[in-house]
Image (cartoon, helix red, strand yellow):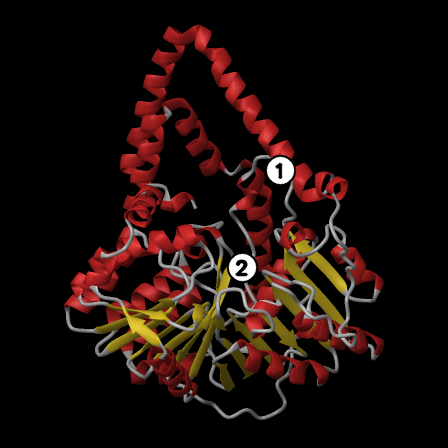
Amino acid sequence: MTIKKNKKVRYLLHKGKKGLLRGIFSRTTIIAALIVLQIFFLCQSYAWMEQYRVLIAIIERIFSISIVLYLVNSDMDAISRVTWLILIMIAPLLGSLFLIYTKLDWGYRDLKQRINHLVDLSSPYLRDDDAILQALKGHTSTTYHLVQYLERSRGNFPIYRKTQATYFPIGEAFFEGLKTQLLLAKSYIFLEFFIIAEGQMWGEILGILEKKVQEGVEVRVLFDGMTELSTLSADYAARLERIGIKAKSFLPISPFISTYYNYRDHRKIVVIDGEVAFTGGINLADEYINEVKRFGHWKDAGLMLKGEAVDSFLIMFLQMWSITEKRLIVEPYLSQHTEEVASDGYVIPYADSPLDTDKIGRNVYIDILNQAKEYVYIMTPYLILDSETEHVLRFAAERGVDIRIIMPGKPDKAVPYALAKTYYKGLITSGVKIYEYSPGFVHSKVFISDDSKAVVGTINLDYRSLYHHFECATYLYRSSVIADIVQDFKETQASSKLVTESQLRQRPWYQKLVGLLVKTIAPLL
């Protein structure tokens, strides 16, 4: 895979060929080595305890039974319960200690408190309009109750009307739309992305951002800390600061065994002047606009909002940005929305956090499936389901709802793809139609139902998105843009192949074996 660098594109990193010494002493290698060293010492400690085998065995048995009783009586998803039970059966003491470590989240107590405090501070800016709620109630009681749930959730996500939505069925269209709006910015530009990688896409955007800084526009960039190990350098935020862009890395990776690695900022948010917002599955890297080919054609989706609903995305960004600060400043960035925007249906931006028990992303998807009368169309790159979500999908199909799922034809990761295949047979048996996108990789995260509801955002149908990551999405009801999303789904389906049970039976035995083995630890992936 090669990238032809355009001289007009802005770069902050100048990576030459990596020599042996540079590779050995890289930050990624050092962190990996330190983590391996910690695991080694843990194993050595366990081996040392073997000399007290009888005493340890008694303690281990009592301890494991207590943990099993906790699991049986917990509200944990059934598949997650089974995964932990298998782990404890194989290694009783280590499995039990690992469960306690992940559940207590010692390193995250302070983070949880800070986020909860920021949510409390921002709640006055997120209030439902009673007139909108009553108008919605006149249309439908089911969506009205979902809106009430979102507004009463920990994030206080309100419903809006005076908002126009534009759907982008491909990364290239999203990129052009984003550049157009960035060039129009007058006051501020806020960007929050899971992945940023230097190349044509980010280079062009960075050039625009640098120009806007020179014009006096405030620019902030927030990216996930995992990016520092994969595509950027550890000092990339400092490099951006040197050209006038305020930048932060969200939860940078540390050289210690930690549950930090699970909780990543998977969101994609752009807010411009409080008037325009972007979200969707598209990161700032060249594969998302097919500038480079990694897994065939990259099919993605994005959404642009103009109007009052942008307020919610602004608050989402400011909450995440302010995690490392002692205050939340909102008022200077709120727009008065003086430009008249016609109402086009109902719009509800929302976020999901792994640090509370309210799994909003999952619950919204389940509500759509439960309320569907005619159809639910889904595009997702991954299909790793908990027991309830799988049951709801199958039951919807069994009661006559047309359920269609478009998956990648060329996956980006072999193991999750093999794992997804383990769900195919049960879903197909219940009547779910599964398609695989022949030209390449589907990265869109889209739900559509009955020509009246749609969700476009960052939330995949897997454990990482539904349980472990910070996510965001937009729920659309009775909006004209839903017709564009339906059209995109149908065009994507036309380029996809229907998966049959006979095809599943013909899969190589080793792929089936990998899927079945990995399924036992799916919730931990």
The answer to which of 348 and 432 lies nearer the viewer is: 432
Q: Is residue 165 left or right of residue 227?
A: left
Assign a secondary structure to mark 2. Answer: loop
The type of residue carrying mark 1 is Ala
Q: Quadrant of residue 344?
A: bottom left
Residue 165 located left or right of residue 93: right
Q: Is 499 in front, or is 449?
A: 499
Identify the residue at image location x=69%, y=80%. Answer: 182
* Few, some or many residues within 10 Å of mark 2 (<14, 14–19, 20+): many
Secondary element at image label 1: helix
- Residue 277 vs residue 280, the one in the foreground: 280
Distance between mark 2 and mark 1 Cα atoms: 22 Å
Q: Is residue 304 above or below residue 431?
A: below
> Quick one: which residue is furthest to the left in this view?
399
Percent x, y of residue 74: 31, 39
In x, y percent, where is residue 410?
42, 64
In the drawing, what numbered circle is on residue 51? none
Q: Can residue 463 be spotted in the picture?
A: no
Who's the residue at 63% across and 45% down the image? 253
Question: Percent x, y for residue 355?
Answer: 49, 49
List the residue tagged with mark 2.
266
Return the disc, 2 or 1, that comes first in the chain's sequence: 1
Task: Give the residue at mark 1.
Answer: 32
